[in-house]
Image: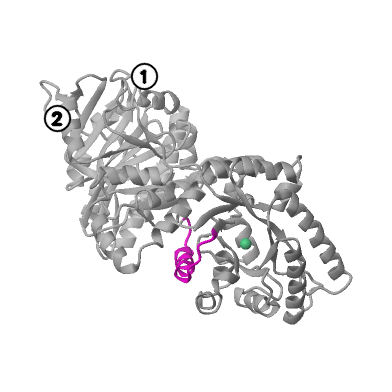
């Protein structure tokens, strides 16, 4: 199917929107008339710009409150339509989008609506144009697409078709049955796609503020597109997204997100089901396997609080890079790379963000496939890895200014055994940390959908629905991105408030990044004992009183938990023990022990942890 986006979906002026759409690779655009009305040039200028950018203007939209009106509105509407036809000649577009009438003057008569649309289609045909009719979910008498189809069918004109917008269909609770069984492909004038989180609210407000790109929300857009595909529809899929965050985000970035969404939709709806199953079994072995290492950008020397915190967690520099100011820390199955090399990507990251995580290395079962997917999804590669200061591993640009390295078994051998040499006289230390349990990345609220979809589309991670975590100074919203084998778990956090933990991190580190790293262990009491108490986040006594009431824990266990500032959770699957380090440059570490098959993250404790972190932050301000 061909790719298009309505200009209302992007921020900026009309030329800025068009340039962003073209740069992202869209073939077509729908011109949202407000964008044209507020543009200082002429419609012919837009026609020329579209030609220069090789964008087809697939439609002008929307034309409102047209059908089944009494006089004098009816005559005025036909006059208005003639003016729009003239404008369409100047714009170089051949299709006008008509959305169902919401006027208080509207007559509830399908036959009149059909007759008006027939008459307008006849006029459009004389101009070489066609019209499409769309049911708005809040249309006064035509709100379901089945009713719009009844009117289009009754109007019976070659230059009139139905516009299918899955947002309206799903917001009304419509099924795909009428589309599947009744609507011929040649009567589909245009298909608009949009997603949205599952929310219960009035449909006009829902539509104007919460739409997002397909794959970013909870609607069954995939099934809708699959249905069209099965019918043999091959024309445009066009995004029509009204979203407050999109309006306040750079158009080029959102246009790329929109293109990724259509690529993802195409990927999800191409192969027949039987092939999909075989392909998916093969892909399981080729996907992201684990976090191979985490790279930190640090200043020269060891007089650095983040470095010192890592040492307090039992990490030692065990290997040095043979040619660069890069060292390796290992503990259990955890590899941390400390990059202090000048003139490197890491150093650039350090200059902007301070001591921080600058890259994640993910192991993959098929290196070429991982890079091919990144290219397919318009993700920039980081290719100057052979330059001074760069690790000899290819990478892609990821969240914020960070990188993701892809490594396979051969890369690991080259990296650890060829690039690094053991540091003499250093014995492997450790306090029982075994592997990276999960990672927390904090992003600006305008990047939240985009970041989750990055993991979902490029890396084929599953994304959980959003969860609210109450911070003492606001609300944090969190979603999890989890690899297919469940070994890589990345919590994505954001806030819309100015003082919550996530915003403090963004302010401190000047942008999105890794705020949290959780390490797992098998004996958390022993591990926590090995960490200086002053470095652990202090948990208030009231938490333990509540814990006793909630779980009926015995006094001895409560005392042990309290003495190490440990938190606790229990589910039907098992138990969870965890504690937190204090923050350094906004970054903190968590130590976790999962007992039996506990799969959660102690979410019920998050508000106590967030309040404790706010206390630490205030205490540091007063120091
Ligand atoms: Mg629409």
Q: Residues within 10 Å of mark 2 (few under 14, many from 20)?
A: few
Marks 1 and 2, Cα distance to the nearest angstrom? 24 Å
Question: Was residue 235 drawn as part of the magenta stretch in this picture?
Answer: yes
- Name the residue rendered at 79%, 62% in the picture: 81
Q: Residues within 10 Å of mark 1 (few under 14, many from 20)?
A: few
| Quadrant of image for the C terminus | top left
Q: Which residues are magenta?
A: 216-236
Left or right, 24 with reference to 121 = left
Per the image, the residue denoted by label 1 is 343
Left or right, 453 with reference to 179 = left
Camera-nearest residue between 384 and 195: 384
The part of the image, by quadrant, that contains residue 322 is: top left
Count of numbered marks = 2
Residue 369 appears at what percent x and percent y?
29, 46
Colour basis: one colour
Disc assigned to residue 417? 2
Q: Is residue 446 visible?
A: no
Camera-nearest residue between 421 and 472: 421
Residue 481 appears at what percent x and percent y?
36, 51
| Lower position in the chain sequence, tag 1 or tag 2 | 1
Residue 448 appears at what percent x and percent y?
48, 47
Residue 552 appears at what percent x and percent y?
28, 62
Question: Was residue 174 drawn as part of the magenta stretch in this picture?
Answer: no
Disc 1 element: loop
Does the numbered disc 2 mark a residue whose Cβ is under 8 Å from ligand 1?
Answer: no
The part of the image, by quadrant, that contains residue 84 is: bottom right
Say whether marks 1 and 2 touch (CB < 8 Å): no
Residue 466 lies, with reference to residue 526, above or below; the image says below
Q: Is residue 220 visible?
A: yes
Image quarter for ligand 1 equals bottom right
Disc 2 element: helix
- Name the residue rendered at 52%, 55% in the picture: 2
């Amino acid at each position: 199917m061909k790719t298009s986006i309505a200009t209302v979906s992007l921020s900026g002026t009309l030329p800025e929107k068009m340039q962003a759409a073209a740069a992202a690779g869209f073939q077509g655009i729908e011109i949202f008339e407000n964008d044209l009305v507020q543009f200082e040039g002429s419609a012919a200028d837009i026609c020329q710009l579209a030609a220069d950018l090789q964008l087809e203007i697939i439609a002008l939209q929307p034309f409102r409150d047209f059908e089944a009106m009494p006089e004098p509105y009816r005559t005025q509407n036909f006059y208005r339509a003639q003016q729009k036809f003239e404008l369409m000649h100047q714009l170089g577009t051949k299709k006008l989008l008509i959305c169902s009438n919401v006027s208080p003057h509207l007559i509830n008569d399908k036959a009149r609506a059909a007759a008006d649309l027939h008459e307008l289609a006849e006029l459009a045909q004389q101009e070489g144009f066609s019209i499409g009719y769309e049911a708005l979910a809040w249309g006064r008498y035509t709100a379901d697409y089945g009713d719009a189809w009844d009117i289009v069918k009754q109007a019976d004109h070659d230059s009139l078709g139905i516009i299918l917008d899955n947002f309206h269909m799903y917001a009304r609770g419509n099924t795909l049955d009428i589309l599947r069984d009744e609507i011929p492909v040649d009567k589909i004038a245009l298909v608009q796609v949009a997603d949205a989180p599952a929310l219960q609210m009035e449909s006009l407000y829902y539509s104007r503020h919460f739409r997002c790109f397909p794959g970013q929300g909870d609607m069954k857009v995939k099934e809708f597109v699959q249905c069209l595909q099965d019918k043999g529809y091959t024309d445009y899929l066009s995004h029509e997204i009204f979203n407050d965050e999109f309006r306040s985000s750079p158009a080029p970035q959102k246009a790329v997100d929109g293109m990724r969404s259509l690529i993802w939709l195409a990927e999800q709806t191409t192969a027949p089901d039987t092939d999909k199953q075989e392909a998916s079994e093969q892909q399981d072995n080729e996907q992201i396997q684990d976090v191979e290492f985490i790279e930190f950008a640090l200043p020269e020397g060891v007089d650095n609080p983040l470095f010192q915190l890592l040492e307090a967690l039992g990490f030692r520099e065990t290997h040095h890079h043979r040619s660069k100011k890069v060292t390796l820390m290992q503990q259990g199955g955890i590899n941390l790379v400390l990059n202090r090399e000048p003139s490197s990507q890491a150093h650039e990251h350090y200059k902007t963000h301070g001591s921080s995580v600058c890259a994640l290395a993910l192991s993959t079962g098929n290196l070429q496939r991982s890079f091919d997917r990144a290219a397919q999804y318009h993700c920039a590669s980081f290719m100057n890895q052979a330059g001074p200061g760069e690790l000899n591993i290819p990478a892609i640009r990821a969240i914020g200014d960070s990188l993701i390295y892809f490594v396979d078994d051969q890369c690991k051998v080259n990296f650890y055994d060829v690039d690094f040499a053991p540091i003499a006289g250093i014995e492997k230390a450790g306090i029982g940390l075994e592997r990276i349990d999960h990672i927390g990345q904090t992003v600006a609220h305008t990047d939240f959908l985009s970041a989750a979809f990055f993991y979902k589309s490029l890396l084929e991670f599953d994304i959980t629905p959003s969860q609210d975590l109450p911070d003492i100074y606001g609300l944090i919203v969190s979603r999890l991105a989890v690899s297919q084998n469940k070994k890589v778990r990345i919590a994505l956090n954001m806030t819309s408030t100015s003082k919550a933990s996530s915003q403090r991190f963004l302010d401190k580190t000047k942008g999105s990044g890794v705020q949290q790293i959780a390490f797992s262990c098998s004996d958390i009491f022993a591990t926590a004992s090995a960490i200086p108490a002053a470095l652990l986040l202090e948990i208030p006594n009231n938490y333990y009183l509540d814990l006793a009431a909630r779980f009926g824990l015995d006094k001895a266990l409560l005392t042990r938990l309290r003495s190490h500032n440990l938190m606790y959770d229990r589910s039907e699957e098992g138990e969870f023990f965890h504690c937190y380090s204090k923050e350094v440059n906004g970054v903190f570490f968590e130590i976790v022990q999962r007992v039996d098959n506990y799969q959660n993250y102690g979410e019920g404790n998050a508000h106590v942890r967030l309040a404790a972190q706010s206390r630490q932050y205030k205490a540091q301000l007063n120091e």
